[in-house]
Image: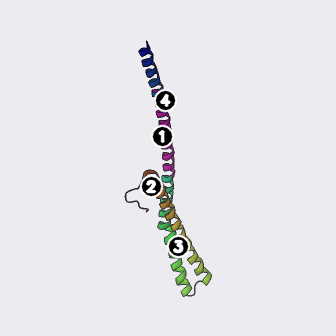
Amino acid sequence: KEWADLILQVIARNEGEVAQANAARARAEAELAALEADVRGELRVALAEYAGAATNLHAIRGSVAPLAEQALAQAQVAYREGGADYLSLLDAQRARIEAGALELQALLDAWLAVARIESLVGPLAGSEVP
């Protein structure tokens, strides 16, 4: 009878340890699922930030900066020929500088988004910003 009681105690103890291990595994799996969901959400945000920055950069490089550059060139010619005052030239220069600042901000935003993406998924091969 003592052997039977001992065997039953060992079995009961093992069943308790197995139940505890299963509960710990279930908690770990739930925590992992929650972390994966958080990372997916952060990745979606970072990808959207990158897309927005890339769109802004494309628009600035495609129209805003060239138009500001063209306006500055025209203002310089007009000023040299006496067809525009100095204030008009300064306004054109300011507009070109602001377009450059917008381009740099969009470039910074794009690279920050790339860095955030890489912090979530690891290094990207050939990371480039348009």
Dot 3 falls on a residue whose secondary structure is helix
Tell me the amino acid under the disc marked 1.
Leu
**Mark 4 or mark 3, whichever is nearer to me:** 4
User: Mark 3 and 2 residues: CB-CB less than 8 Å, in contact?
Assistant: no
Counting residues from the N terminus, which is met first, the one under dot 3 or under dot 2? 3
Residue 40 is situated, as x and y percent measured from the top left of the image, at 48, 46
Q: Tag on residue 68?
A: 3
**Mark 1 or mark 4, whichever is nearer to me:** 4
- Residue assigned mark 1: 32
Residue at left 54%, top 74%? Answer: 96
- Residue assigned mark 2: 118
Please give the range of residues in magenta. 18-45
Q: Is residue 28 left or right of residue 125?
A: right
Counting residues from the N terminus, which is met first, the one under dot 2 or under dot 1? 1
Please say if 2 is above or below 95.
Answer: above
- Residue assigned mark 4: 20
Q: Residues within 10 Å of mark 3 (few under 14, many from 20)?
A: many
Counting residues from the N terminus, which is met first, the one under dot 2 or under dot 4? 4
Please say if 23 is above or below 81.
Answer: above
